[in-house]
Image (cartoon, rainbow, N blue to C red):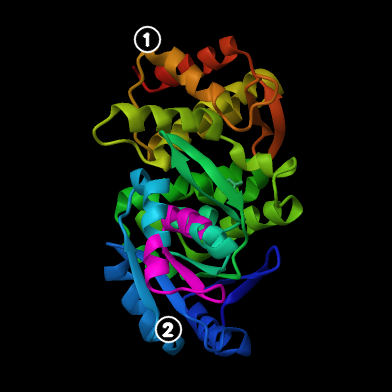
Amino acid sequence: MSRVLQSIGHNIYFGDNAFVELDELLRTTRYTGCRKFIMVDENTIKHCLPVLLAATEELADAEIIETESGEKNKSLDVCFQLWSAMSELQADRKSLLLNLGGGVICDMGGFVAATFKRGIDFINIPTSLLAQVDAAIGGKTGVDLNNIKNQVGLFAFPEEVFVAPKFLETLPPSQLKSGFAEVVKHGLIADRQYWNSIREIKKVRNDITDDIIFQSLKIKNNIVVEDPEEANWRKVLNFGHTIGHAFESYSLEHDRKPISHGEAVAAGMICEAFLSHRKLGLGRNDLHEIVSFILRVFDSYPVKKETFTDFISLMRNDKKNVKGEIRFTLLSRIGSAEVDKPCSEEEILAALAFYRLNTFQ
Ligand code: GLY
């Protein structure tokens, strides 16, 4: 039996046996005769689809819709192709879409399902660490627009989520690390003890256990359940993301091989830990602990002083800004965070300078 968490009107099933529950669900009258579509990319069609199909008899007749992996494909153009494919395959309002993939597939698949014929049911089956602890949980669906992350989208909750950690075995180390940044974030914002166990991790590939993943997912789910549509408290999940998204958008625009979301968030967490020290009195030891752990695990991103203003412009575009203020989630100590903390341009520039200094640039 898998472990089960209750989320917003649905359950999250966690464990390598979770597909037994999926098969049972698909046998219920709710899904009798319903057409099933599985969205995959070139990786999940190879590594994950055979596992899912072998474990789930009810998906034997499912149509497979393939898209390309990568953040650059999380776009309205690709949604257009996906809506068209579903139309051509005569998906109807009772059809079910199963999103088998990482963050891109879960975010975009949810959006495609929520808008197709005014909304059809979807199920998330996250296959990357990032999707298992973050993207598949909490109903944020959408796509990027002109390199601005998640600019178009809506809240739409899946019917159920099935998380099988065994899928992570086929992930390249860089992708595993990318998701690990969200695990680190969950410890920092919510649970000092959990952070202490994360700090024991030497090599992400070898040391990340099912319990660590489950705990991370649970922290995210608890926050979502408290504030599903981010009226206030859910903003706590944005720690590291305000400056992190600027790193990510900048890199998407300028680098031949852009940094991953996780690397960007890791850089963002260093900068925002510095702001936490300045604005909320996060202790010097905590700041040092955070910076040294992140730099031990993640590569740093080269950022020139001359580009700091580009980063500020990107932050000005952030959906979370209110009345022109750039607002942050900051830590008062490890395991405890506060939302909606405005920081001035000067303070953000100091945070970027702190990042440069600590990464020996
Ligand atoms: N990834 C942040 C959130 O789901 O709110």
What residue do we see at 52% from left, 32% from top? 269
Query: Label 1 amino acid?
Result: Glu
Query: Circle 1 sits on which residue?
Result: 306
Name which quarter of the figure residue 8 lies in. bottom right
The x, y position of residue 155, in whole percent, is 63, 52
Whether residue 95 is situated above or below residue 80 in the rendered picture: below
The x, y position of residue 227, in whole percent, is 74, 50
As drawn, is 55 to the left or to the right of 317? left
In reply to whether residue 347 is colored magenta, the answer given is no
In reply to whether residue 110 is colored magenta, the answer given is yes
What residue do we see at 38% from left, 23% from top? 359
Secondary element at tag 1? helix
| Of callouts 2 and 1, the N-terminal one | 2
Location of the C terminus by quadrant is top left
Q: Nearer the viewer, mark 2 or mark 1?
A: 2
Secondary element at tag 2? helix
Numbered range of the magenta stretch: 84-111
The crowd level at tag 1 (other Cα within 10 Å; few <14, some 14-19, many 20+) is few
Q: Nearer the viewer, residue 99 or 328?
A: 99
Q: CA distance from mark 2 to mark 1?
A: 54 Å
What residue do we see at 34% from left, 35% from top? 299
Q: Nearer the viewer, residue 195 or 303?
A: 303
Whether residue 361 is situated above or below residue 109 in the rendered picture: above
Any part of residue 40 in sight: yes
In the displayed orientation, state which residue is furthest to the left: 256
What residue do we see at 48% from left, 33% from top? 245
The crowd level at tag 2 (other Cα within 10 Å; few <14, some 14-19, many 20+) is some
On residue 59, the disc is 2
Query: Label 2 amino acid?
Result: Leu
Name which quarter of the figure residue 38 lies in. bottom left
Location of the N terminus by quadrant is bottom right
